[in-house]
Image (cartoon, helix red, strand yellow):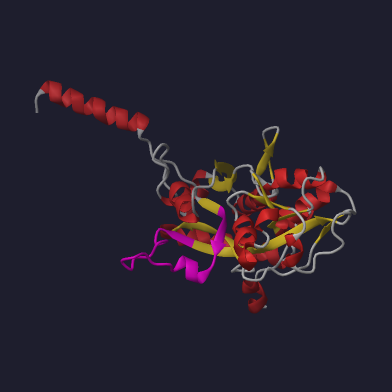
Amino acid sequence: MKKNNFTALIFWLSCCGIFCTTTFARSYDDIIESNEITVAVYRDFTPFSYQVNGEAKGIDIEVAKHIAKKLGVELRFRWVTADENVEGDLRNNLWKGHFLKRTVADLMLRVPYDKKYSQLRDDIGELVHEQVHMFAPYHTESWKIVFNTKKIEDVTTMAIFQYHDIGVEVDSIPQFYLISAFNGRMSKRAKQFNSLPLAISAMHEQQVDAVMGLRSQVSHYQHQLASPDYQLANNAFPNIGKQQWDIGMAVKSDYRQLGYAIADIVEAMISDSTMKQIFEDYHAIYQLPAFYSVAE
């Protein structure tokens, strides 16, 4: 090889080292040896993971802290923004990394825990989630409505929202549900906001009479309103699809030993009510996943 070509090769390899550095998900042994675990959590997602004056707060933050403590390692957070779908989130943050920043986490929280979903196959029969192992359901989520009792006496059926304005987050399942359910009879009353907190604020300012969102989020914000005028409804949601679903965690498929160790920690947290207490500390309704009810 000519000297100038060799020099060019060395320069190219150096640039790769500087600009194309990749951090891979690591095994249980590597994490213990390095005394550090990186956990991916969603950014600005109250009450699960958010920051106040630079300090990490939230349910998932406390869960991650407990896991790191039990593993005996230091904790680092990878703050992530939701992609178009869960597949993109898992790819960008757990096994491949975003094309602009090839780094990933060792563990990701708030991942769907569903056997059919984890075994989903693409058009040619390949597993969509072959690269990840989903495990440790730690919460069962559902939809909930909070309403202003000065505007609505009670919410026993969704039909009432043919006559009352209800706030929803834009591009969310509640938005699509209210627009399309019952032949669209509630569509004109569904008011869209860029976030659930904005919808809650609009209700507090008398712009809408109710808000629909995730039960854990809605119950958290209802407590923040600190007024008996705002109550949680107990109605069902006909034709919405899944009425409730489990939330769990994920690691890269190659590192199931890490998943098994964390699953044991999560099970202990559920058994001794640590998990339930974390949710209660953030005034979010907690529901035990059926996975553990069956085990009992």
Numbered disc total: 0
Task: State whether residue 83 is above or below residue 13.
Answer: below
Q: Nearer the viewer, residue 53 or 68?
A: 53
Q: Can residue 252 be seen here?
A: yes
Q: Is residue 166 left or right of residue 20?
A: right
Image quadrant for the N terminus? top left
- Residue numbers of the magenta segment: 109-133
Q: Is residue 238 left or right of residue 8?
A: right
Give the residue furthest to the top. Answer: 4
Image quadrant for the C terminus? bottom right
Q: Is residue 105 left or right of residue 161?
A: left
Asked if residue 111 is among those painted magenta in the image, a careful observer would answer: yes
Q: Is residue 201 left or right of residue 137?
A: right
Q: Residue at x 54, y 43 (%)?
A: 80
Asked if residue 124 is among those painted magenta in the image, a careful observer would answer: yes
Task: State whether residue 239 is above or below residue 17.
Answer: below
Q: Nearer the viewer, residue 226 or 202?
A: 202
Q: Nearer the viewer, residue 233 or 54?
A: 233
Q: Residue at x 70, y 49 (%)?
A: 47
Residue 77, quarter of the rendered image: top right
* Residue 101, horizontal then vertical, whole percent: 42, 37
* Residue 188, horizontal then vertical, whole percent: 67, 54
Task: State whether residue 221 is above or below residue 289.
Answer: above
Residue 283, quarter of the rendered image: bottom right
Q: Can residue 245 be seen here?
A: no
* Residue 104, horizontal then vertical, whole percent: 46, 45
Q: Residue at x 58, y 51 (%)?
A: 171
* Residue 178, horizontal then vertical, whole percent: 65, 59
